[in-house]
Image (cartoon, rainbow, N blue to C red):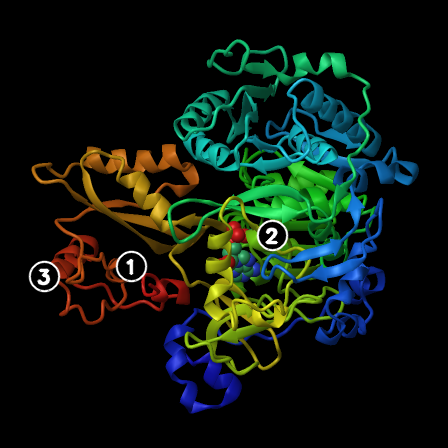
Amino acid sequence: MASNSAKQSGDASIESSEAQIAVHWGEETKVAPPATFIAQANLADPTARDRFSLERFPECFKEYADLLSWDQYWHTTLDTSKAPFWKWFVGGRLNVSYNCVDRHLAKYRNKAALIWVPEPEDEPAQVITYQELYQRVNEMAALLRDFAHLKTGDRVTIHMPMVPELPVTMLACARLGVIHSVVFGGFSGEACGIRIADSGSRVLITMDGYYRNGKLIDHKKNADIAVATAEKEGQKVDTVLIWRRHPGRKVTDAALIPGRDHFVDEVLRPFRGQRVAPVSMPAEAPLFLMYTSGTTGRPKGCQHSTGGYLAYVTGTSKYYQDIHPEDVYWCFADIGWITGHSYIVYGPLALAATSVMYEGVPTFPDVGRPWRIAERLHVNIFHTSPTTIRMLRKAGPEEPLKYDLHFKHMTTVGEPIEPEVWRWYHQVVGRGKAVIVDTWWQTENGGFLCSTIPALDPMKPGSAGPPVLGIHPVIYDETGAQVPAGSGKAGNICIRNPWPGIFQTIWGDPDRFVSTYYRKYNRNPQSTDWRDWPYFAGDGAMQAADGYFRILGRIDDVINVAGHRLGTKELESACLTVPEVAEAAVVPVQDEVKGRLPEVYISLKPGVAASPEVAEHVARAIETQIGKIARPKSVRIVPDMPKTRSGKIMRRVLAAISNSMDVGDVTTLANPDVVEQIRTMVQGAKPAPAQPVPDDIRRFGQVE
Ligand code: PRX
């Protein structure tokens, strides 16, 4: 395969980076946005980039902040005095639920704010107008304040599926200045319990059950596990509020614990019709925590701000999602991830959008489901992940053509998208008439970092695009030298400047915040000049001569499964809870649909015989401690782990075996023979032919 880098620069000296960027696609032809889209776009003014140039930083972000209603305007746009703990819009006060709900009532009272589509197809969609949302948010806020005794600054953990009660609960928290921590509904009770304890929540809000793939899942039982786990970790939960999927009907077998557990529909009754004045919050007060995986074991609670975050997601929703109040916008993601917070709830509702939520899986009851939803609701903006797109394409490549679809705009987020998958999305789903934005960003970032401006920039399949307005990336090599801009050489992507959506800290662990994201390329730890603090994203990337960035994947030991980050250390500690297991190592393997899957290697304690049961226990331990999304592709029991002489497990070697790569020089290992034994076990007697592998797998286990 020809080297992209060589093709772009014509420079043979950069051949060495070819191995690094041996991704499975080449340079792609660009596609211009259609005139029909440009004619109606929120941002079609080519001077926008000048308005957000580095010279205009940080004042440029006033343009986003001015999309909000402030109780009190700020006096300082960016305060860097405690670098890198940036403060945006200092002196300003506002309330997020007011901005997402109340302020729209005058004009849009009777317009759909949320349209919720239940998974069972015979259950009708629920349309929640802004007026209805206002009522529900107020009643829930009253309950949280007067029944659950929550006050400004308290944390509350929410472990709920995709139902409208979830955004209602989040907005009710925001109304009071209570910091919510939403844990993805598919995470296990134990994973939820760890996050409850880390955030110090004494209240858990959950649901009795929900539909997934045609089955009514008992979710309440997870709450009991979560509370027990939190208690083991030293955090007592005194109140569990349980929304009911079918009020009055028995959905869960788990009993209610008297005094602790309450059905929300019952305890909400006395609060019917109540109003709660929105609490005017300082712009830099935390709005929510969102946990994500890192290199070391414990998940990180990313703390997002009130004013900066809301300004950033509102601005990017307007310019990059091109949301107008009259659009029907469907972000097919889960609110339990950052995408759902920013681009199902906060950004769209701040713009008075109609935001569609779907409860279930894409292929229930068949692969036509998403397209039937889009047709019936006349969705014109669609937003989802490459994994969902790959799944829908694989199972029903012609299916979208059977429906009357009218997308003007489509988004892809969370993982690199292969150009052939992109083209299917563009031609078959979008009928060649929709603009596509590929958006690169992370839980820590609040909103997009790289994307094309839909009406201004041509699309390039497989590339996230130029940096978004006000974001100024740079690529550094391991030594801290800048990789020349537009050289097509791979390196570590960083953002030079702070932006309003950036998280404020890791909850309870400011040192880890600084060391993970800033230490690597910091020029002076004492400096209060933002120029000395590039943000280290942890992704490999290259910038082509046209300025577009291609994201090559994680450079740390984080596995991106279906667009969701799983820490290898978290998975490994789950394996080690199985008593027979002595050592565990987790590596990523390529998967046609989900991008990457974890593959587990374990060695057993002396005297324990290998058996399929032990392997199954390990897979199950991962499911119960993390969640089904983390289920490994396989669990391989090996006689010993490949190790250095100092006893360090060589995950790089295992990743090479799992992905049919050359294992490289293993002669310096303490036990080189075991490598061939494991290779035979995985690939059979004859070595599998070497495959081209993406950058993140090639680099896996190499960064210490
Ligand atoms: O490796 C990048 C990948 O997903 C990681 C962030 O994951 P998470 O925090 O779960 O947030 C996902 C949704 C914002 C990044 O470090 N990633 C995200 N978007 C893209 C991507 N890789 C390639 N292209 C993208 N568009």
Say what amino acid the circle numbered 3 marks: Asp
Q: CA distance from mark 2 to mark 1?
A: 34 Å
Residue nearest the observer in this picture, 338 or 12 = 338
| Mark 3 element type | helix
Residue nearest the observer in this picture, 279 or 687 = 279
| Mark 1 element type | helix
Q: Which mark is residue 504?
A: 2
Q: Could you tell me if residue 366 is visible in this image?
A: yes
Residue 207 coordinates in the image, percent (x, y): 57, 23
Q: Earlier in the sequence, mark 2 or mark 1?
A: 2
Q: Say few, some or many: other residues with alpha carbon within 10 Å of mark 1 (under 14 / 14 to 19 / 20 or more).
A: many
Quadrant for the C terminus in the image = bottom left
Residue that carries the numbered disc 1 in the rendered image: 655
Q: Is residue 28 above or below residue 609?
A: below
Q: CA distance from mark 3 to mark 2?
A: 48 Å
Q: Which mark is residue 673?
A: 3
Q: Say few, some or many: other residues with alpha carbon within 10 Å of mark 2 (under 14 / 14 to 19 / 20 or more).
A: many
